[in-house]
Image (tube, rainbow, N blue to C red):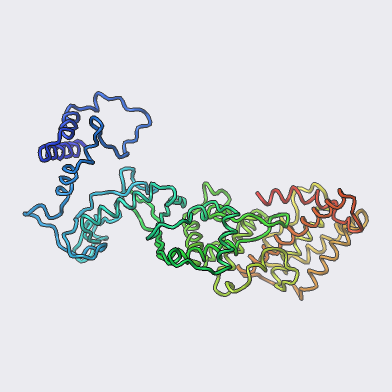
């Protein structure tokens, strides 16, 4: 550390002598008097922060002579005894002297050193090739090196062009300025803005000057002194808007009460795959969702596996996980031509055995909730995992176990019994038998069937309760009690 400080002082002394600037001489005098021994630093002082000097209102770093000195000091070809190699710069494409080591660092990369990280670095034989080492593995001239590090630092420091991705940062930019808040759509989408985007995509109108503008994005994370490029996106603004429109359309699904619900940002969707998002969320999950949202690429089936696993562990499914499952299913090539509107709410015409099994489990649970008020653990808490993966092994038992519940409802709440019995008959009428096993995709469909049926039942209960309060309840007063039994469970599932 002492050697580095002495080298820094030597560079400043040369700058003062070369430029003759009084402000630079004042800085040299100040530093040679060992100010660190006389100044008391506050507890929140950041030793890795970038600092500069101001002398009588003047910033020496802004003076033309100082900038010219710095440019010359960093000229890779300034030492005649050790000339810099001339290579093709990977950025400008010109044959120029290139830097053996880039001087500027990229700051603000999650996981990187506070003093900055290098995006080009090869300090071990394993990283070298063709006899090139250090920064020569990706040859860059001094001018381009300074430009791209300044650009990266500006993007990382600007909230409007940066999005945190759990241990990484997504930075993005367009070749020309556009009035479109990409970050808000990814992080916390506003309903009115999403609706406007969907309407624009449906109309199919294009604004060439905007939609043809290039869009770039990269995901960066730090590993010690290095910046790691985790992903790279190269597309157009028009394509991003179109894919975002598809993204929001595909995740549309009713809430626990059968009502239209809000659209979700990346973090809310990713959090549905783990028990504790603060502790357990894996960075690749967010990156996969980001790429799917911006490029329309299929989401990894691993996300479906994680969602299904949480369903089994928790014994229920809330809005966020239902939306994620729907997204993953509709993003797959074999399904992406299906109408996204068919999976927004209950589809009584859906012939899928997996979907109907999910609906059946929801209806059997509803019968139990109404027959045994205040029950601590329903059949879903105990049997969701088995029912969603191997229906034939458990549904016979569940149907037999439901008979006492149905008998009690028939005796005490005949209207409710009739409504539930009709739904059970309708669901089973489309089943020729219970599948022995369900594939991972079918387990996702099962979950949607369960979720849709529960939401439908709660919506029916809510409507019946409203009619009763208005004094208009007729014979289907049937679901009056359901509104009370379904409420707490619905709140739990939404959370």
Q: Which residue is rendered at x = 53% and y = 68% of the image?
A: 205
Q: Is residue 19 above or below residue 341?
A: above
| Res. 55 image quadrant | top left
Can residue 168 be seen?
no
Q: Is residue 470 above or below residue 353?
A: above
| Res. 463 image quadrant | bottom right
Residue furthest toward the left?
Answer: 81
Q: Report the side of 449 relative to 169 (left or right).
A: right
Question: Residue 37, position in %: x, y?
Answer: 24, 25
| Res. 350 image quadrant | bottom right
Q: Which residue is rendered at x = 11% and y = 37% of the image?
A: 20
Q: How many marks?
A: 0
Question: Residue 486, position in %: x, y?
Answer: 77, 51
Which quadrant is the N terminus positioned in?
A: top left
| Front in this rendered view, residue 78 or 117 | 78
Question: Residue 97, position in %: x, y?
Answer: 16, 59
Q: Report the side of 365 relative to 437 (left or right).
A: right
| Front in this rendered view, residue 175 or 478 | 175
Can residue 128 be seen?
yes
Residue furthest toward the right?
Answer: 411
| Front in this rendered view, residue 45 or 395 | 45
Q: Which residue is rendered at x = 23% and y = 49% of the image?
A: 103
């Amino acid at each position: 550390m002492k050697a580095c400080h002495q080298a820094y002082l030597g560079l400043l002394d040369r700058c003062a002598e070369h430029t003759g600037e009084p402000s630079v001489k004042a800085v040299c005098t100040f530093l040679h008097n060992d100010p660190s021994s006389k100044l008391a630093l506050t507890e929140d002082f950041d030793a890795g922060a970038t600092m500069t000097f101001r002398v009588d209102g003047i910033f020496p770093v802004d003076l033309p002579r100082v900038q010219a000195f710095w440019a010359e000091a960093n000229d890779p070809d300034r030492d005649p005894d050790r000339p810099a190699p001339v290579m093709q710069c990977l950025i400008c494409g010109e044959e120029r002297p290139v830097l053996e080591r880039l001087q500027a660092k990229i700051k603000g990369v999650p996981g990187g050193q506070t003093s900055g990280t290098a995006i080009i670095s090869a300090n071990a034989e394993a990283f070298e090739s063709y006899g090139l080492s250090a920064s020569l593995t990706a040859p860059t001239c001094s001018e381009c090196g300074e430009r791209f590090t300044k650009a990266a630092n500006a993007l990382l420091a600007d909230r409007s062009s940066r999005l945190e991705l759990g241990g990484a940062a997504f930075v993005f930019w367009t070749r020309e300025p556009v009035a479109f808040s990409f970050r808000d759509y990814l992080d916390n989408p506003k309903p009115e803005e999403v609706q406007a985007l969907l309407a624009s995509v449906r109309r199919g109108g294009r604004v060439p000057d905007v939609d043809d503008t290039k869009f770039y994005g990269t995901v960066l994370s730090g590993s010690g002194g290095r910046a790691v490029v985790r992903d790279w996106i190269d597309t157009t603004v028009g394509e991003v808007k179109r894919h975002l429109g598809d993204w929001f359309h595909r995740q549309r699904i009713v809430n626990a009460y059968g009502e239209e619900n809000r659209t979700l940002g990346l973090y809310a969707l990713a959090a549905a795959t783990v028990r504790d998002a603060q502790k357990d969320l894996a960075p690749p999950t967010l990156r996969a969702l980001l790429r799917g949202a911006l490029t329309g690429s299929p989401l990894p089936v691993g996300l479906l596996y994680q969602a299904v696993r949480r369903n089994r562990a928790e014994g229920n499914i809330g809005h966020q996980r239902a939306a994620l499952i729907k997204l993953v299913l509709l993003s797959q090539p074999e399904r992406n031509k299906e109408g996204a509107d068919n999976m927004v709410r209950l589809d009584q015409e859906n012939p899928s055995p997996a979907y109907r099994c999910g609906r059946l489990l929801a209806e059997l649970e509803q019968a139990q909730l109404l027959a045994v008020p205040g029950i601590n653990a329903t059949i879903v808490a105990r049997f969701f995992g088995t029912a969603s993966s191997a229906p034939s092994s458990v549904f016979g038992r569940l149907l037999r176990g439901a008979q006492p519940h149905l008998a009690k409802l028939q005796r005490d709440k005949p209207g409710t019994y009739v409504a539930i019995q009709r739904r059970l008959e309708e669901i089973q009428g489309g089943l020729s038998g219970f599948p022995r096993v369900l594939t991972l995709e079918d387990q996702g469909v099962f979950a949607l069937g369960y979720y849709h049926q529960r939401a439908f039942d709660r919506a029916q209960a809510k409507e019946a309760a409203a009619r009763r309060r208005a004094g208009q309840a007729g014979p289907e007063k049937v679901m009056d009690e359901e509104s009370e039994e379904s409420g707490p469970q619905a709140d739990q599932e939404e959370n």
